[in-house]
Amino acid sequence: MYKLDPPALLFETSRPGRRTAILPAFADVPDQRPLEELIPAGFLADSPPPLPELGELDVVRHYTNLSTSNMAIDANFYPLGSCTMKYNPKRNERLASLPGMLALHPYQDESTLQGVLTLLHEMQEYLAEIAGLHAVSLQPAAGAQGELTALLVAAAYFRDKADRRTRVLIPDSAHGTNPASAHLAGFETQTIKSNDKGLVDLDDLRSKLDRQTAVFMITNPNTLGLFDHQIGTISQMLREQGALLYLDGANMNAILGMVRPGDMGVDLMHYNPHKTFSGPHGGGGPGAGPIAVRDHLAPYLPAPIVGRRDDGTYFLDLDRPKSIGRVRSFFGNVGVLVRAYCYIRTHGPEGLKNVSRHSVLNANYLRALVHDVYPVPHGETCMHEFVASARGLAREKGVRAMDIAKRLLDHNMHAPTVYFPLIVPEALMIEPTETESRATLDRFAAVLRTIAEEDPALLHDAPHTTPISRPDEVAAARNPILRWNAPVADPGANGNGHSTASAQRSSSHAAATVPSAP
Amino acid sequence: MAYILNTDDDVRQMLDTIGVGEIDELFQSIPAEVRLQRALNLPPALSELSLTAHLIDLANHNQGGDQMPCFLGGGVYDHFVPAVVDQLAGRGEFYTAYTPYQAEASQGTLQAVFEYQTLVAQLTGMDVSNASLYDGGSAVTEAALMALAVQDKGGRIVVAGTIHPEHRQILETYTANLDVQIDVIAPDRTGRIAAPRLADALSKPAAAVILQHPNVFGLLEDIEGLVRIARDSGALAIVSVDPISLGILKRPGDYGADIVVGEAQGLGNYLSYGGPHLGILACREEFVRKIPGRLVGQTTDRNGKRCWVLTLQTREQHIRREKATSNICTNQGLLALRSSIYLAVMGPSGLREAAEQSTRNAHYAAQELAKLRGVELAFGDSPFFKEFVIRVKGDPNAILAEVRRHGYHGGIALKTWSAGMDDAILIAATEKRTKAEIEGLVAAYRSALA
């Protein structure tokens, strides 16, 4: 990452009349009547939309320069807890971009899709095997949509049994998507406390678990990076009440081939293939959120599912009368699944197990190097990540988790996740992943230890070497400026004369600091 | 060990530092009785060379738009993707970054999203856009949920029967356990929503009306009239658009839409067997605190420098948990970046050309197909954009199979999409189709119908 001022906005670089020729000037069909004779004039705009006018080199310089003000796995250690920022193999990119994969239309006839359907069918089987469950839907577009889909499956299952259940129980250490998804699926949510070891408080669970409980959503290993060894007891308690056990699969990177959710008593779960199976995160997506379920829940999965006929051909099975329906158009984020498929095939059974072994080794090594300075309140060892606390530094020196995070950026390393999970004060959630070397972990630990010794004033103003430092987030939220607007004095200059009154109001708030605004 | 850097020597020293003898001791918190006692039943590891051969073999068992001209549409279209889109979006600094939680380490992504939001607002004529959603279908649903949150009119949503059937299915799935009533208005014989039918449906209060323009049959709705009727009734007007069409059609913001959504695959993204793509969602500024998904806002840093941050995060699940406006976490960052680069390099004239040439190609195809014996345009003179429906004499699937034998992905049979469409085929043409391909398609249909 370079400490350069970011480039001007596209809209500020725009010059009327500048353009890049991409298409031929005219379609080559013989009918060249005016457009108004094909489409009645009442539907047509007087002019094309007021987009910026740029040449190709303008665009190339712009985005190339923009990219250099990002940290990314390709350039930086990125121990962002819960996000599994592992190396994204280049081979997967090339293979997912084969024309025979990219140029497939979702409504092609099945006879022209046998290659991709083979891949997806195998993927369903792999994910069922890794989960120790029976049936898989690849349709959900992201982890959060996978959660929602699984909860809708659970709701349909209970409805089908005429068993009215209204509640979903969620640990206080869970990801925020869990309660949000449960609410959207029509359930009330109730929080289950963690005990002093950071695990599910069984007494609290017992007191809230009853015949109204549809699902308990567990993350195991949990967001503290601890494997909840009470899982057998928990699943037994749920079974006794006829409730289902859901696993948030965000932390599957810790347990591949070591333990399978189904074998722990899990009934349904989602995967995050972009985490566990190395899909590039793309600055915030695309992800995918396939779900796996036990056989008695399979009839409710979204349609279609890829089926295999006796003659060895594959088809989209839409004949699923009990299905909850559809949560995404077409077949889901296939491109992400192709990369995940490549990753699983590259590793094989032993390789996947080694992914987990080394992710756990790296996390424990890093934990051992820093825990005397940054205490880890829960557990003696960890799984693939650990949550340290900067509470001591905050008390003694007024240095907070955010200050430490910001200072790490000065060392060209991305920060851990901070202030999550909510149950650890001044949380630093650190997930090194298996693809980092001991040398990188040593360097990161050394930097963390140095930061603990540094002058608090230096830390409060950190970072010092990044393109910007400490943006005013409060101002951003108080007076949201969510788009660029043309300067009002000369509305046509940049091709956008459509500032709304409300957006002009926004611009005036920014007048002091935005060079292009009035 | 494909991507693991630690050597055996590293591992030994790391275990010493931790104070254990073996890596597997670190897994002792997993009770023995639940541990997997065998290897996963998966195929053995493949080298890059072998994996490459395997994927090429799988790809060779597909016949996509790279092998046969693609006249398929239905929400995903074979538009041209300029080289700069692949080259720039493929930079590792964009590709392998994550959600810009640390603004100082993510100005590239944040500025790109701010520009995306602006481009979508300019394209749709709306005040604000979010940072993108999963796809056009879930965008329709998120817009409906947003309208329910904004309005205080009970849980009724009126849906045009001419929106994409999969979008309606997603809405039905998402709202199955909520107190939401969905009423669908059937199209009339012109394949469109008749204004009196909408007015009639709105004689009872509704939170929102969902319209699609061009609609699922490619037809242009009397969109200005329908939006006016919706708004006069007090319902919010949600309009689902094809962003490419806005190269020539009036912008929804200019005719009063409240929320605009759409499948934006066509903006620089490949067909990719239906995903990953992205959904756009833009709205009037007064609804901004109910908008689902991520938003990037402009602010200044401690030195007064203009910069960008994730903002209005108190709407989101990681803060609000069950009270969030949506459960969505990720956007479709990389696809939004691709769409921005596409719009930047196409510009107003390029987008207009893509839209106009798609229109011309589709109209030429419709005109030539309609001349065939056994083919008629399903909706007569109803105006359309780049997609149209024909009715054929014979079984559409058999005819399409024969057209395919001649080397064309010739259309989508609508039998399962809509009532009364057993003999109907939906055909799309983009700017990529040529006179020769269109005439080849017509010849293939002629032969298939003979």
Image (spheres, helix red, strand yellow):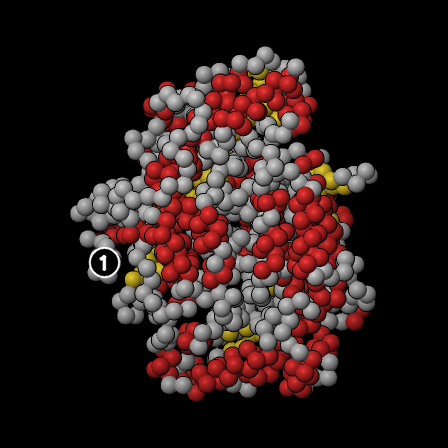
B256 and B115: which is toward the camera? B115
| Outermost residue to the top | B373
B155 and A250: which is toward the camera? A250
Q: Say above or below: A75 vs A300.
A: below
Dot 1 lies on which element?
loop
Subunit of label 1: A
- Residue A458 position, x and y percent, is 35, 81
Q: Is residue A19 left or right of residue A329?
A: left
Please name the amino acid that badge 1 sits on: Pro
Report the number of numbered marks. Answer: 1
Q: Is residue A190 left or right of residue A515?
A: right
Q: Quadrant of residue B12 in the image?
A: bottom right
- Residue B404 position, x and y percent, is 65, 28
Residue drawn at x 54%, y 18% as measured from the top left: B369
Residue A50 visible? The answer is yes
Residue drawn at x 29%, y 52% as measured from the top left: A13
Local crowd size for mark 1, using a 10 Å CA cut-off: few (<14), some (14–19), many (≥20): few
* Residue matched to label 1: A515
- Residue B427 position, x and y percent, is 54, 27
Residue drawn at x 79%, y 64% as measured from the top left: B39
Q: Is residue B20 left or right of residue B171?
A: right
Quadrant of the image containing the C terminus of chain B:
top right
Residue A186 visible? The answer is no
Residue drawn at x 61%, y 56% as measured from the top left: A92
Quadrant of the image containing the N terminus of chain B:
bottom right
A259 and B29: which is toward the camera? A259
A516 and B197: which is toward the camera? A516
Q: Say above or below: A59 vs B250.
A: below
- Residue A439 position, x and y percent, is 57, 80
| Outermost residue to the left | A489
